[in-house]
Image: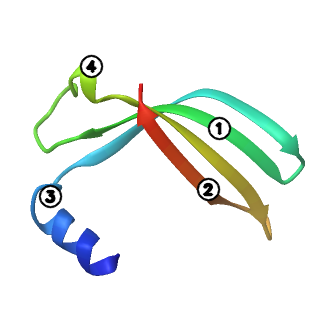
Amino acid sequence: MRSAMGAAFAGPLKGSRRVHTPESVRFLGPDVALVVTRSVTAFAGEEEPPADRWELATWTLMRHDGEWLVEAYHSSPG
């Protein structure tokens, strides 16, 4: 995973960033949240990524020792 992601960020993803816009946040308990975002990868030099590249993502977050961590993530075309 590290070598694959390292190669990706050294090559085609160099200078890219992820954009996440929250659509909903639902607390399933005091330390568990379900978050849905509209997300996209913006490539270097892109002001606005094209509409067909946006996706919907679901995040399961859990609080551990006061810090929110991602326990699960899933995305699909939006």
The residue type indicated by label 1 comes to: Val
Query: Which residue is at the front of the view, 43 or 7?
Result: 7
Query: Looking at the image, is 15 positioned above or below residue 41?
Result: below
Which mark lies nearer to you, 1 or 2? Answer: 2
**Number of disc labels:** 4
Task: Determine the image quadrant of residue 14.
Answer: bottom left
Residue at numbered disc 3: 14
The residue type indicated by label 4 comes to: Ala
Closer to the chain start, of discs 1 and 3, is 3
Q: Is label 2 in contact with label 4 (beta carbons under 8 Å)?
A: no
The residue type indicated by label 3 comes to: Lys
Residue at numbered disc 1: 35
- Outermost residue, top side: 51
Where disc 2 sits, the SS reads strand
The residue type indicated by label 2 comes to: Ala
* 19 sits left or right of 37 in the view: left
Give the Cα distance between marks 1 and 2.
11 Å
Which mark lies nearer to you, 3 or 4? Answer: 4
Residue at numbered disc 2: 72
